[in-house]
Image (cartoon, rainbow, N blue to C red):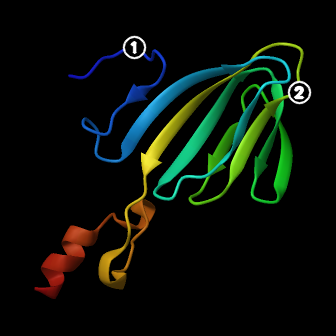
Amino acid sequence: MFVKQIQNGLDLQDTAKSIAAIYDTSLELGESIQPHYHEDFEEVYYILSGYGIMTIGDERQEISRGDVVYIPPPSPHTLLNTGSVPLRFITITAKVFQNPGGLAVIPHSEQTGWAEALSTAL
């Protein structure tokens, strides 16, 4: 069992297979995350409180409590607190695995019945 507190981020690269880290972040009024990108990681922001402007690539959108933002690699992104209260959000950073040799990727929703199909083919 793995139970830890999120304090200044939680690095999971040596524990989890695809989740690299989880962060609980607060931005004060006017504070921002500087533009950056991740070559081999995708991120999801879950907004807990506050308001802001999320920029991913050339797209800008207002965000607020309850919003979920997906940031694909290697998209440059930034976040600015435009509200009057701290903008608090959870970040989940996941490793992106490359597809070696161009193998087909089957969506999880289509994976049911694969064992039966394989046994029929054999």
In the figure, is residue 10 to the left or right of 45? Answer: left
In the figure, is residue 54 to the left or right of 107? Answer: right
Element assignment for label 1: loop
Tell me which corner region of the image, top left, top right, bottom left or bottom right, holds residue 11. top left
Q: Position of residue 8 (x, y in %)?
A: 49, 19
Dot label at residue 104 = none
Tell me which corner region of the image, top left, top right, bottom left or bottom right, holds residue 112. bottom left
Residue tagged by mark 2? 82
In the figure, is residue 66 to the left or right of 30? Answer: left
The answer to whether residue 100 is above or below residue 90 is below
Q: Position of residue 61 (x, y in %)?
A: 85, 45
Mark 2: few, some, or many residues within 10 Å (few <14, many ≥20)? many
Q: Position of residue 52 (x, y in %)?
A: 83, 31
The answer to whether residue 84 is above or below residue 121 is above
Residue tagged by mark 1? 5
Separation of marks 2 and 1 at Cα, in angstroms: 28 Å
Q: Amino acid at mark 2?
A: Thr
Residue found at the far left of this picture = 122
Q: Amino acid at mark 1?
A: Gln
First reached walking from the N terminus: tag 2 or tag 1: 1
Residue depicted at x 59% and y 56%? 72
Q: How many marks?
A: 2
Element assignment for label 2: loop
Residue depicted at x 41% and y 25%? 10
Image quadrant containing the N terminus:
top left
Q: Nearer the viewer, residue 108 or 42?
A: 42
Marks 2 and 1 close (CB-CB < 8 Å):
no
Mark 1: few, some, or many residues within 10 Å (few <14, many ≥20)? few
Residue depicted at x 51% and y 37%? 92
Q: Position of residue 63 (x, y in %)?
A: 81, 35
